[in-house]
Image: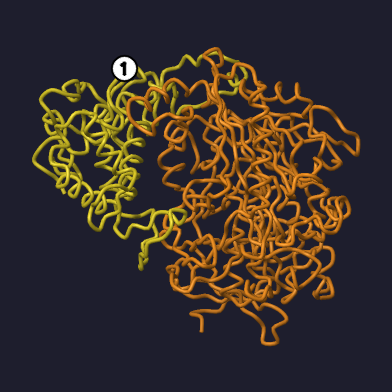
Chain colours: A orange, B yellow
């Protein structure tokens, strides 16, 4: 029995990040009483992220002060089922958030859309290359929702962020200078592209010279004074170089606090409770619906919050964890291949090329931003012919300038010792004369990569930790190597290059490691679809098993895109909210037949 | 835990001939000079100075200990990092694969204290050895080719190297990067970052000297106004 039971609310929302606050905004304006439960603290751009105090590499980038508290809750990890999973004792490979705004505070602001073919991946590949083309051991699925259906919602989120870029496909008309491979946009970007530093300019020139299609990285670092559709005021990015892993005190990186929270916090239908960790979603006796959630409040009391609708808006991994500890849906069993919760966990497959320039090129790497750079999409998705390649998927190739924070940014040419006099000289000589070219590749789901509960370790509330079993599928190793070789070709064609070296996180023979930072793009585990045997939620984001539970975030992705997830997952969020508002609330029921 | 010796006296007494004879007088943490270490003993501090200076030796720019890295490590070990505030510490601690990451069963302060003790016992001449000999010890440690009893060698090296590197390049409010040694060396302008009108000026060196979080506007951009370490 809980210590107390509160009065019923219309909607309870688990998590105060991008999707949770947006759900609250949209549903509160629809007359729904919304209660947001956030496990972390209140914080605000104006009071919490101001320079120069925020510009502290050690505190924020390396001691992870804005991120989740791994001391009290983490997950366990292994590469395969024959191993014993061990706790991720420190943050490393990915950095989930905690506190108001969630990971939306310390994101980079790279704001992408999926390709139309990405959303119909299995159908698309089978129709273009034949039914046998997709390797048998990949769980490649259609999303169940099309680009055309998502487009208005992707567009709206770009307006919420004041996205900066140049449309490469405006209402079906292709335009050089933008991403000519993207799906049709119904409107221009709300703001013009970012300024380009020398390194990304050289990359773009080399790529264009090779017949590729460079364009400025789409950015939620805003480029001019801007007011979003909710009335939030944003300001131009200063290129300060403290973007990802930091909050933005300049009000220049779109985030859930300034773009959404500030515009809903005074609304009569909105309430948020901090330091409130949801323990489980409670199910009705007939198992058809959820009755609300039980959480531990800021006084340590166990509280039951009854609700008509439960929205799951935690980080991708923790949504799946909450389903597993609540007994929502059917857990995936890798032995039998049955069950869906935890199935199709995927990540991101990264490779890159380090380029070292001659002395003429002075990059000033500290003048950076989270979404500053030049990118080509020629090798992403199915933008290139896969018929002879032996893999599906792809990635974008980008030359970005994030930062020059000197503990983390120490470029040295291949063969430099890892410390000592020679290392010191190499860091000094190359700091101002280097560029990284990143390959940001897709990640296919397999039957062997999944999430379940750990049998040994627990969080500070005594619940079993989430257990992650993951390694790079051979398909993705081949893909990553192929796209990396294309990036090497561009590096070779760049002016002023003295030397270069390439590396592939998914290189043959090297296992995925939980330790070095790669990216906070954990996806899947509660995927969207039209078949209840291969998805946790239907195409509206509604749980098959409990029709008043709606699920948000990258846990919905059937396999991961070659793009950063925030744009696509927010497109899905607005799509789900649209159907909640226009259909479900007036007539609560399963929106699709199972 | 403190000692009766000032930091400066301890470090200046490191060796008769070598690196620390050039310890600058007006360094960033002159304010710390008369204070005992928060965590380290004088022996540990001397050992760490020798170790850090092998990792980041003096050249045209200061060595690690000359740049205050031992002060930095002392404050880190006494603070939240040393106390394990950033680590999930629930047992058991079975060993795993390298891909499974850090699995040390001790909080960093204890791990490093025990690690230094084991290293001092195994390599009694380390502090007075030449760079080549010290490098060879650290290479073996970094390659896990070192018997430290129950302590894992490579994770110890990784921890010490990470701290040394951080101490050389972190904002001076943490006790290292004295006189902006690390930032001067690479050309990083620091915490007062606003480049809207400069980012697309290609191949132009940025003219401003480094300034840290505690930099006083109108000051000379060299010495932070005071010590603001993490909560100890």
Looking at this rendering, what residue extends furthest in the right direction? A172
Q: Is residue A19 above or below residue A338?
A: above
Chain containing the residue with disc 1:
B
Q: Give the image location of residue A221, x and y in percent.
A: 64, 35
Q: Give the image location of residue A311, x and y in percent.
A: 67, 66
Q: Left or right: B146 with respect to A390?
A: left
Instruction: Please say whether residue A105 is visible from this viewpoint.
Output: no
What residue is at 45 percent from the left and 68 percent from the top? A459
Q: Nearer the viewer, residue A510 or B2?
A: A510
Q: Badge 1: how crowded within 10 Å, few (<14), some, or many (20+)?
A: few
Q: Nearer the viewer, residue A309 or A572?
A: A572
Q: Quadrant of residue A360?
A: top right
Q: Is residue A347 above or below residue A210?
A: below
The tally of labels here is 1
Q: Is residue A475 above or below residue A429?
A: below
Q: Left or right: A227 with respect to B77?
A: right
Q: Give the image location of residue B224, x and y in percent.
A: 32, 27
Q: Give the image location of residue B215, x and y in percent.
A: 37, 26
Looking at this rendering, what residue extends furthest in the bottom direction? A285
Q: Nearer the viewer, residue B157 or A190?
A: B157
Q: Left or right: A60 with respect to A373?
A: left
What residue is at 62 percent from the left and 47 percent from the top? A349
Instruction: Please say whether residue A56 is visible from this viewpoint.
Output: yes
What residue is at 16 percent from the left and 35 percent from the top? B127
Q: Nearer the viewer, residue A469 or A366?
A: A469
Secondary structure of residue under mark 1: loop
Looking at this rendering, what residue extends furthest in the left direction? B4
Which residue is disc 1 drawn over? Answer: B60
């Amino acid at each position: 029995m809980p210590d107390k039971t509160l009065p019923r609310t219309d909607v309870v929302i688990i998590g105060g990040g991008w999707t949770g606050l947006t759900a609250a905004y949209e549903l509160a304006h629809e007359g729904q009483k919304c209660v947001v439960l956030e496990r972390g603290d209140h914080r605000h751009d104006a009071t919490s992220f101001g320079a120069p105090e925020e510009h502290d590499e050690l505190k924020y980038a390396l001691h992870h002060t804005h991120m989740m508290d791994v001391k009290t809750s983490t997950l366990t990890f292994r590469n395969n089922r024959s191993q014993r999973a061990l706790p991720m004792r420190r943050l490393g490979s990915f950095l989930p958030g905690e506190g108001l705004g969630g990971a939306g505070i310390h994101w980079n602001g790279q704001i992408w859309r999926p390709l139309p073919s990405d959303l119909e991946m299995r159908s698309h590949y089978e129709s273009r290359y034949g039914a046998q083309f997709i390797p048998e051991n990949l769980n490649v699925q259609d999303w169940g929702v099309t680009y055309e259906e998502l487009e208005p919602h992707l567009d709206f989120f770009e307006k919420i962020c004041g996205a900066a870029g140049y449309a490469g496909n405006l209402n079906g008309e292709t335009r050089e200078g933008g991403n000519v491979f993207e799906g049709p946009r119904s409107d221009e970007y709300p703001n013009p592209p970012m300024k380009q530093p020398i390194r990304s300019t050289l990359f773009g020139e080399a790529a264009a010279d090779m017949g590729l299609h460079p364009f400025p990285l789409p950015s939620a670092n805003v480029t001019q004074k801007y007011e979003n559709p909710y009335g939030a005021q944003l300001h131009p990015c200063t290129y300060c170089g403290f973007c990802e892993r930091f909050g933005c005190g300049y009000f220049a990186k779109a985030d859930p606090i300034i773009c959404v929270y500030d515009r809903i916090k005074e609304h009569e239908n909105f309430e948020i409770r901090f330091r409130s960790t949801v323990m489980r979603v409670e199910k009705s006796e007939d198992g058809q619906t959820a009755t609300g959630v039980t959480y531990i409040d800021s006084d340590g009391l166990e509280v039951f919050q009854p609700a008509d609708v439960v929205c799951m808006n935690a980080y991708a991994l923790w949504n799946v964890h909450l389903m597993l500890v609540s007994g929502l849906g059917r857990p995936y069993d890798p032995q039998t291949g049955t069950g869906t919760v935890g199935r199709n966990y995927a990540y991101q497959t990264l490779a890159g090329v380090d380029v070292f320039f001659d002395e003429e090129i002075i990059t000033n790497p500290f003048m950076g931003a989270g979404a500053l750079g030049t990118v080509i999409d020629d090798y992403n998705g199915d933008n290139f012919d896969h018929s002879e390649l032996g893999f599906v998927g792809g990635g974008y190739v980008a030359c970005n300038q994030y930062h020059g924070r000197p503990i983390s940014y120490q470029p040295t040419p291949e063969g430099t010792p890892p410390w000592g006099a020679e290392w010191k000289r190499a860091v000094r000589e190359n700091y101002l004369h280097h560029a990284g070219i990143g390959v940001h590749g897709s990640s296919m789901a397999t039957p062997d990569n999944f999430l379940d509960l750990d049998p040994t370790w627990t969080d500070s509330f005594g619940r079993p930790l989430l257990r992650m079993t993951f390694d790079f599928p051979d398909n993705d190793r081949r893909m990553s190597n192929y796209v990396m070789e294309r990036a090497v070709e561009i590096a070779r064609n760049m002016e002023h290059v003295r030397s270069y070296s390439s590396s592939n996180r998914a290189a043959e023979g090297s296992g995925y490691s939980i330790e070095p930072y790669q990216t906070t793009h954990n996806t899947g585990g509660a995927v969207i679809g039209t078949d209840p045997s291969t998805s946790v939620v239907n195409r509206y984001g509604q749980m098959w098993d409990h029709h008043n539970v709606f699920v948000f975030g990258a846990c919905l992705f059937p396999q991961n895109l070659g793009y950063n997830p925030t744009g696509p997952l927010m497109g899905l969020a607005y799509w789900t909210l649209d159907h909640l508002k226009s259909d479900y609330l007036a007539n609560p029921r399963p929106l699709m037949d199972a | 835990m403190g000692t009766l010796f000032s930091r400066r006296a301890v470090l200046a007494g490191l060796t008769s001939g070598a690196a620390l004879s050039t310890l600058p007088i007006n360094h960033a943490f002159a304010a710390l000079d008369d204070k005992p270490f928060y965590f380290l003993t004088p022996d540990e501090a001397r050992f760490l100075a020798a170790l850090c200076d092998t990792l980041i030796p003096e050249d045209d720019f200061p060595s690690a200990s000359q740049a205050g890295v031992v002060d930095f490590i002392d404050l880190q070990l006494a603070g939240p990092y040393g106390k394990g505030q950033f680590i999930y510490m629930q047992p058991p601690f079975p060993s795993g694969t390298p891909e499974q990451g850090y699995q040390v069963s001790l909080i960093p302060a204890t791990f490093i204290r025990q690690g230094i003790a084991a290293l001092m016992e195994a390599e009694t001449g380390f502090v007075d050895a030449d760079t080549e000999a010290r490098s060879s010890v650290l290479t073996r440690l970094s390659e896990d080719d070192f018997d430290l009893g129950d302590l894992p060698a490579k994770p110890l090296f990784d921890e010490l190297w990470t701290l040394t590197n951080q101490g050389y390049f972190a904002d001076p409010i943490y006790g290292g990067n004295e006189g902006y040694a690390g930032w001067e060396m690479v050309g990083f302008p620091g915490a007062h970052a606003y480049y809207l009108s400069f980012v697309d000026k290609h191949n132009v060196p940025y003219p401003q000297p480094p300034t840290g979080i505690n930099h006083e506007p109108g000051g000379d951009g060299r010495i932070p106004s005071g010590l603001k370490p993490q909560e100890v």
